[in-house]
Amino acid sequence: MIEIIESGPFNTVQDLGRPGYRDIGVSASGAMDPLAVRIGNILVGNDENAAAIEVQTFPFSLRFEQRVVFAVTGADGNPHLNGSELLPWCAYLAEPGQVLELKQPPRLARAYISIGGGLDIPVVMGSRSTSLRGGFGGNAGRPLAKGDRIAVGEDAEIAMLPASGLAVVEPAVALRDVFPAPVGGALPIRALPAGEHDLFAGDGEGFWSQTWRISSRSDRTGYRLSGEPIKPTASIEMRSHGVVPGVIQVPPGGEPIVQMSDANTAGGYPKIAGVIECDLWRLGQAHIGARLKFVRSTHAEAHKVEQAVAGYVEDVRQTSRMVKRALRVMA
Amino acid sequence: MIVTTNRHASQREIVPATKSLARVSSIGARSFLLEAPGDFDLIAQRRIWALSQTVKGWPDLAENIPGMTNLLVIFKETPEDPDAVVARLLEAWENARSIDLKGKTIEIPVHYGGEYATDLPALCDLSGLSDREVVRIHHEATYRVFALGSAPGFGYLHGLDPRIYMPRKTVPSLKMPKGCVTIGGMQTGVAMLTGPNGWNSIGFAALEMFDPTSPTPAMMAPGDTVRFLPAGIEL
């Protein structure tokens, strides 16, 4: 068991999501930074899709009631175990009674806590993710709160960890060639023009050329962007159609909304563009107030980035397996 | 190193809508939206249902979501050649034979008017009809579930009488209650969640239409027939 000691209002249980039910109106949900969840789970020896805790309001703390392996990923710093600072992207062993505290990471928006054996939570429609809109899944369909206790699944082989832990090179560093750094403080987010792009005529260029700011009215469902409004040349009443995370819709006010993990499954607002799937985790790690710029991409480029990410994940999987095997032999 | 300078992407994958040709556009790199040409009617929707059944057999497909005379298909991985995907989708559309889904009939008791009918006066103003006429026109029609989406179990219903079409609101209601019976453009439905909603409410239905723990969580399915029964009229 783990017990939540302190939590902000929007911290939830998330895995890689609940795909396959969009056709009955159910959002996939899942972690805003799925890459962090995959790496965290590999580090602690779980299936990649095991449920983790997504922390997006800090500080957050929990007490381990049993001996477990855990890792904090996603964040770029500030996890503490019984007051000692830990490295993020690193698996550690916790003893019963120890308290893990996550303070606001320096730059990134969301941290993930993976625990060996996974969170033992019922699977609803194929996933343990919390559906906040639907009020089901995860921790009784609601955010975590002080006093909540969550069971931890059985960890068949508590990894033999060196006392200093087992770390991984984080994606932002390992994949810096395919995920360019911010330019002039604005995070580059790659996107493809979507169905109604041409309806924006000259304002379409304004969409690509200006720097947008993530407004405070942003959450797991969508990011609202502040900037110079863009308007279509005609107002059209569209037939409702399926949408996915990454779609950039423009409501009548002219300030775009990027749908995120808890995305609506259908929409009718004009779509100017769609963020390529492999860049969504970077957007998920951008906090309110951050500045970003959309960069026109291509399917070919998105395909290359996807392959680079898959290669990195596979490398982490192989290497961590090898290291653990070696440590077991040495022990 | 992947080049990420701001340049013009190929737009060859965007096929313009014409009377006879379906239009395919993309959302992100893995999702493609096929929009049927022509009218918003059951004929087009039957072909969309047929197309949905065809693409379900594609091994590289992750999900497909029927919409209102359109279909969103999501691939497992980003296709290297989007033009080939567009061609494959258009070919499947051309070959899609109209099918009819044999659905069940669902009767939904509705309390028309009253405190939930926040947009009924505006609808009367727009249509020039009395509230009584609007309600009668709404419950006398027979609707088909074209697609589900937007919220768990929410069914988009076709069959609304054009006399009571009403555009979505420019400024959505911030907290429309679950159960509101609404009109959005040429579509009608029942709100499944309490929350922001741009459709126009004319009544309320208490029926539970979604249960996540059930093997079939959504009560409605594409092809079903829906009748609204006036359980109460408060004008």
Image: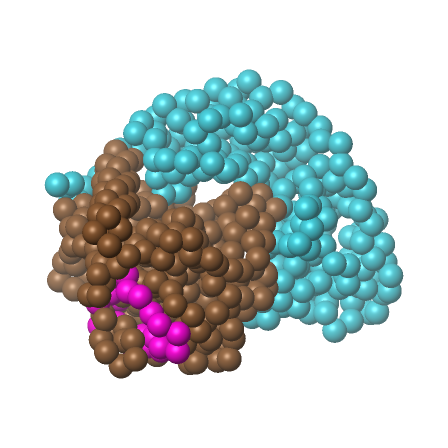
Q: Quadrant of residue A94?
A: bottom left
Count of numbered circles in the view: 0
Q: Which residues are magenta?
A: A87-108
Q: Quadrant of residue A118?
A: bottom left
Q: Who's the residue at 83% across and 57% down the image? A: B109
Q: Who's the residue at 34% across and 26% down the image? A: B83
Residue A46 seen anywhere in this rendered image of the structure:
yes
Q: Is residue A222 or residue A81 the one in the foreground?
A: A81
Q: Is residue A67 above or below residue B11?
A: below
Q: Who's the residue at 26% across and 51% down the image? A: A328
Residue B183: image location, x then y, percent: 67, 55
Q: Is residue A94 or residue B128 the one in the foreground?
A: A94
Q: Colour of chain A?
A: brown
Q: From the viewer's perspective, tell me whether residue B113 is left or right of residue A330.
A: right
Q: Is residue B52 or residue A43 the one in the foreground?
A: A43
Q: From the viewer's perspective, tell me whether residue B43 is left or right of residue A321.
A: right
Q: Is residue A90 or residue B146 the one in the foreground?
A: A90
Q: Is residue B83 above or below residue B25?
A: above
Residue A313: image location, x then y, percent: 27, 45
The cyan one among the chains is B
Residue A206: image location, x then y, percent: 26, 54
Residue A256: image location, x then y, percent: 37, 58
Residue A37 seen anywhere in this rendered image of the structure:
no
Residue A80 is a magenta residue: no
Q: Who's the residue at 57% across and 57% down the image? A: A122
Q: Is residue B77 above or below residue A73?
A: above
Image quarter in which the C terminus of chain A is found: bottom left
Residue A103 is a magenta residue: yes
